[in-house]
Amino acid sequence: PFVFKGKELEINYATSAAGYVKIEILDAKGRPVPGYTVNDAQEIIGNEIKRIVLWNGKEDVSSLEGKPVKLKIYLKDADLYSLKFN
């Protein structure tokens, strides 16, 4: 687990036309955090240097700031180059 500061998660990624990136936030014990599950995560398609990750259309992760979390990253025919919390 790690602790972050910020209000949003930004990624640098590339997918094929059939691929995607999805990111789930887990608590320190590995359980999905309600509102940030894989089912809540927006499927991200394309090729961008700066893309804000959304869950149910929302980007705000500030409620988790300072708490130990893990990220579970789902990639289908995709590359994830970097991520950061802003």
Image (spheres, rainbow, N blue to C red):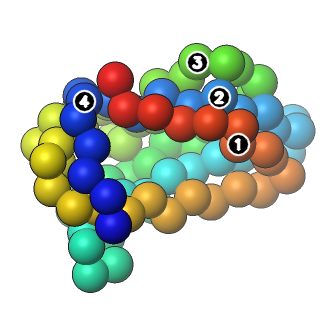
Q: Which residue is mark 2?
A: 12
Q: Are the residues at dot 3 and dot 2 in contact (C-beta closer than 8 Å)?
A: yes
Of label 1 and label 2, which has the lower sequence position? 2
Q: Is residue 39 visible?
A: no
Q: Are the residues at dot 4 and dot 1 in contact (C-beta closer than 8 Å)?
A: no
Q: Are the residues at dot 3 and dot 1 in contact (C-beta closer than 8 Å)?
A: no
Assign a secondary structure to mark 1: strand
For badge 1, the amino acid type reads Leu
Of label 4 and label 3, which has the lower sequence position? 4
Specify the label residue 80 is tagged with. Answer: 1
Q: CA distance from mark 4 to mark 1?
A: 20 Å
- The image position of residue 73, as x and y in percent, is 57, 58
For badge 2, the amino acid type reads Asn
Q: Are the residues at dot 4 and dot 3 in contact (C-beta closer than 8 Å)?
A: no
For badge 4, the amino acid type reads Gly
For badge 3, the amino acid type reads Lys
Q: CA distance from mark 2 to mark 4?
A: 17 Å
Q: Which residue is mark 4?
A: 6
Q: Nearer the viewer, mark 4 or mark 3?
A: 4
- The image position of residue 84, as x and y in percent, is 46, 33
Task: Tell me if mark 2 has few (under 14), some (14-19) or many (20+) residues whose alpha carbon lies within 10 angstroms of its own.
Answer: some
Q: Is residue 21 above or below residue 24?
A: above
Q: Which residue is mark 3?
A: 50
Identify the residue shown where x is 77% and y is 56%: 76
Q: Is residue 20 visible?
A: yes
Residue most toward the bottom? 29
Q: CA distance from mark 4 to mark 3?
A: 15 Å
